[in-house]
Amino acid sequence: MLFRTKDLEAIFNGQCTLAFRRWKKPTVKPGGAVRTQLGMVGIDSLEPIEPHEVTELEARAAGYKDRAGVIAMFDAQEGTCYRIRLHPAGPDPRESLRDAEPDAAELKALATRLQKLDKAAPAPWTRQALQLIADHPGVVSTSLAETAGMERADFKLNIRKLKALGLTISLEVGYRLSPRGVALLATL
């Protein structure tokens, strides 16, 4: 589930408590959370609705000027219409994870996790990716992927796996290693 920056700001300021989407298949479920650039957004409920059920008050609670804006969004898409109740659910847990200094047991567990990622791939890639990012922080992913001999989309997918472990940080352009990533790379 994607949010515009202004909608995320409204969610985290407590001004936005609803979202409306039209999907062929929902991408969220009640009790779940969505990772965004500002933090986690919790999903309280997901209800299929008919467009005419949207009220003016609900439209404003979802960040729309009026009900007509929600209806226009529904009309421009296909699928079932949904009303989603949501709330800010705190910071992205990867942020605290990436800044935490790992102990010896965590480093061993991370190294084991990287071995599993390497075994699941056509060729080992984790150490090379960490080293490339360490050597070239802030370099565009296209260049890093080329150096690694990979397609850009595959390279970025791999870096997201490292980011989920708290090892990398996405920059405006490129990446850098987190303190956790630096500590792990020093042991590999």
Image: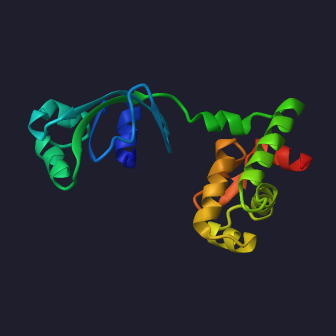
4 sits to left or right of 70: right
Name which quarter of the figure residue 41 lies in: top left
Tell me where residue 109 appears, x and y as whole percent: 81, 35
42 sits to left or right of 129: left
Position above or below: 187 against 83: below
Tell me where residue 116 appears, x and y as whole percent: 76, 46
Tell me where residue 9 appears, x and y as whole percent: 39, 40
Name which quarter of the figure residue 83 lies in: top left
Tell me where residue 142 appears, x and y as whole percent: 62, 71
Q: 184 or 24, which lies in front? A: 24
Q: Quadrant of the N terminus?
A: top left
140 sits to left or right of 73: right
Q: 25 or 8, which lies in front? A: 25
Position above or below: 184 against 97: below
Name which quarter of the figure residue 13 lies in: top left
Q: 131 or 178, which lies in front? A: 131
What residue is at 43 percent from the left and 25 percent from the top?
31
150 sits to left or right of 34: right
Q: What colour scheme does the image use?
A: rainbow
Figure label count: 0
What residue is at 41 percent from the left and 33 percent from the top?
12
